[in-house]
């Protein structure tokens, strides 16, 4: 087709607005991986079938992850004259019920995520659901669910389209102000002006160490050599992390637009998205978005009559954690073994095919359209002195509200875990939170008022990383936690450098001995010494951060190590052979759950009377502890 003009963009935007903000009822189902895994496809089919059978005139569509993954499938109902209603934990039966209720101009409050009144007459003076919150002005201003703490304290910018627009429709993205930043960059700004704007914004890389993005771009632009390349690192390998996947599944065009702007600023003609092969849905959505962008002339030759040529290809990674490191990622794209190489030279000087290359994370690229469209000053309105904007976390583990969150830099860990995440479930005590994935550190309750930014986390021995966050309660053994993450990094080490290859293995051996009752005096000090040596001498960031879980757990939970070594006891009741379970008769309510679930018949007792546990029969599986509603199963 002919190249897109501003008039064409406005027409597509108008079409997208009619689709996103219809004059008739619209039902959107969250269809990212989390929703599909919970049955969202069946829910959408049931909604469409029920609407047809009732002759109900509605628009049914899919959308990306709304963030509250624990309550999937989520169904978003937008009806003129009503406030936005989100139904949670839907199934086929419930879906039919809400459609039948809509046909009678009613809602079902017990299924709603937000507290809402049942009588529809209360909505009579309410404008269109979305208009109640204001139509989006460019990007970054979309409705939220303010009466739900999980959403109320968030500040959605990068995630503002995820869970609202349909990722399969480019007109939905354009309706949200998409590609206006690209028009602005190519028509009003020269490459240096784009880089200056990004530099002034204070945006730091959202994929690891937090290097200033504008400086990184400047280095690559000034480097000698042609052609230049830009790469999107979507090799998200941290256990429990799914931020990048969710963005690509829910709003791939925002990442593409960011890459085009970055390539224009740097002088690159080709881009690569390096995505994990384990992300088939993300790759599917990205592939479709690239085709749509090419169809509109937003990729290819002479983009927007600017004389700028640029296109993007997708490379699938094989799931090696080390390929999240820039030079290992480049080696993988080139078809060789994904191993890091010595730096310098840095990729900005000699990267893909030994040409200047700029690599940024998915979240970094997704921030670029916002900065160019709204300006650096707007971006800097939130955040801390050295960490501007927002950060996206996948909050998992022992927390009531598991999900994807976007919060201002500087929010405290306590606010994140207890206000946004809802705190620890099952009346258990909070113990620690790990940030930064396998290479991050474990932060105790005493530091929970720490503001979350790159520098503050580094001060306490952790890292921001790409945004993984694991919450742990009193049942976590911190020695075992350190062993788990050391096992992961040891297995994922490429083996190229001795400190990482041998050092992580030796640290893991020591941790294994401690958790199995073979710990010796001096092991703690040996772990500390080895950790510092590995950090100082490893070739890449995998080895340079691998000791963090062990070092921070020793730093903040040293007494647990000492209990394991000196008393052959695991206070948390995790390391088999180093503890005994018992049932506290004062707190046992005699519900019988532990008795029914115990695989070794070690528990006896009558209903509504305190139960007892036979230590000789107990296999220490922990099922009784997990299922006990009164926290009566204890450790000694």
Image (spheres, grey):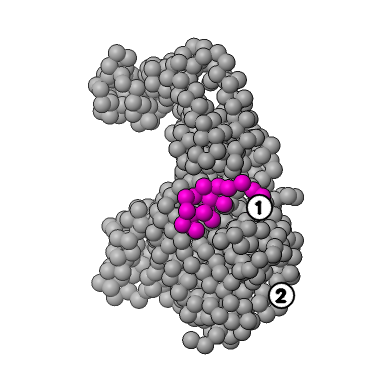
Which residue is located at x 42 percent, y 22 percent? 575
Query: Image quarter for residue 354?
Result: bottom right
Numbered disc in front, either 1 or 2: 1
Image position, residue 401 (x, y; %): 48, 45
Image position, residue 421 (x, y; %): 52, 44
Query: Image quarter for residue 179?
Result: bottom right
| Residue named by callout 2 | 189
Dominant SS in magenta: loop
Q: From the viewer's side, name the closer residue of 456 and 63.
A: 456
Q: From the viewer's side, name the closer residue of 458 and 100.
A: 458
Which residue is located at x 31 percent, y 21 percent? 619
Q: From the viewer's side, name the closer residue of 130 and 283.
A: 283
Specify which label sits upstream in the sequence, 1 or 2.
Answer: 2
> Mark 1 and mark 2: span between their CA atoms?
30 Å
Q: Is residue 304 above or below residue 486?
A: below
Q: Is residue 160 above or below residue 171?
A: above
Under tag 2, what secondary structure?
loop
Image position, residue 305 (x, y; %): 61, 84
Image position, residue 494 (x, y; %): 49, 42
Specify whether residue 331 is painted magenta: yes
* Residue 441 appears in the rendering: no
Image: magenta residue range: 327-346
Under tag 1, what secondary structure?
loop
| Residue named by callout 1 | 345
Query: Image quarter for residue 445?
Result: top right
Which residue is located at x 66 percent, y 77 percent? 186
Specify whether residue 208 is painted magenta: no
């Amino acid at each position: 087709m002919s190249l897109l003009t501003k008039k064409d963009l406005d027409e597509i935007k108008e079409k997208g607005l009619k689709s996103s903000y219809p004059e008739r009822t619209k039902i959107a189902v969250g269809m990212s991986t989390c929703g599909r895994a919970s049955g969202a496809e069946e829910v959408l089919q049931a909604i469409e079938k029920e609407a047809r059978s009732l002759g109900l005139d509605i628009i049914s569509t899919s959308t990306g992850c709304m963030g509250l993954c624990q309550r999937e499938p989520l169904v978003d109902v937008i009806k003129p004259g009503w406030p936005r209603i989100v139904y949670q934990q839907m199934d086929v039966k419930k879906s039919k019920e809400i459609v039948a209720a809509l046909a009678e101009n009613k809602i079902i409050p017990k299924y709603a995520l937000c507290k809402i009144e049942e009588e529809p007459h209360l909505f009579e003076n309410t404008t269109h659901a979305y208009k109640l919150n204001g139509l989006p002005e460019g990007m970054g201003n979309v409705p939220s669910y303010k009466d739900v703490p999980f959403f109320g304290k968030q500040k959605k910018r990068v995630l503002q389209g995820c869970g609202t627009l349909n990722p399969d429709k480019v007109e939905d993205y354009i309706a949200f102000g998409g590609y206006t930043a690209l028009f602005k960059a190519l028509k009003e700004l020269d490459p240096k002006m784009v880089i200056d704007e990004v530099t002034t914004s204070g945006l730091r890389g959202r994929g690891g160490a937090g290097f200033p993005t504008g400086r990184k771009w400047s280095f690559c632009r000034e480097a000698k050599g042609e052609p230049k390349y830009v790469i999107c690192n979507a090799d998200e390998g941290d256990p429990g992390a799914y931020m990048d996947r969710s963005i690509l599944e829910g709003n791939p065009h925002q990442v593409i637009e960011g890459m085009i702007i970055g390539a224009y600023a740097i002088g690159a003609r080709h881009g690569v998205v390096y995505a994990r092969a384990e992300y088939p849905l993300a790759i599917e959505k990205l592939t479709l978005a690239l085709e749509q962008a090419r169809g509109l002339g937003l990729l290819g030759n002479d983009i927007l009559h600017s004389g700028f040529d640029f296109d993007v290809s997708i490379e699938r990674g094989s799931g090696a954690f080390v390929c999240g490191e820039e030079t290992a990622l480049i080696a993988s794209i080139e078809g060789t073994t994904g191993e890091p190489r010595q730096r310098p030279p840095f990729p900005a000087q000699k990267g893909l095919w030994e040409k200047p290359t700029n690599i940024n994370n998915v979240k970094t690229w997704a921030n670029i359209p916002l900065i160019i469209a709204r300006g650096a000053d707007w971006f800097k309105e939130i955040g801390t002195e050295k960490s501007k904007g927002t950060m996206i976390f996948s909050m998992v583990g022992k927390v009531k509200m598991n999900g994807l969150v976007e919060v201002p830099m500087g929010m405290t860990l306590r606010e994140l875990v207890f206000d946004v995440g809802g705190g620890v479930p099952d009346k258990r005590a909070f113990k620690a939170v790990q940030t930064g994935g396998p290479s991050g550190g474990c932060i105790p309750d005493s530091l929970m008022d720490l503001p979350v930014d790159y520098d503050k986390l580094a001060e306490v021995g952790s890292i921001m990383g790409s945004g993984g966050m694991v919450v742990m309660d009193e049942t976590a053994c911190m020695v075992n936690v350190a062993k788990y993450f050391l096992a992961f990094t040891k297995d994922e080490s490429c083996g190229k450098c001795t400190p990482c290859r041998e050092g992580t293995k030796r640290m893991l051996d020591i941790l294994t001995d401690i958790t199995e009752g073979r710990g010796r005096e001096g092991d703690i000090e040996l772990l500390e010494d080895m950790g510092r040596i590995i950090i100082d001498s490893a070739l890449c960031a995998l080895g340079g951060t691998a000791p963090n879980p062990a070092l921070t757990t020793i730093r903040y939970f040293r007494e647990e190590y000492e209990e394991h070594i000196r008393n052959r006891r695991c206070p948390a009741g995790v390391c088999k052979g180093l503890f005994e379970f018992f049932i506290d008769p004062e707190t046992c309510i005699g519900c019988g759950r532990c008795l029914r679930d115990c695989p070794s018949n070690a528990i006896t007792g009558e209903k509504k009377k305190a139960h007892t546990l036979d230590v000789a029969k107990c296999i220490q599986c922990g099922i009784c502890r997990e299922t006990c509603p009164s926290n009566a199963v204890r450790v000694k």
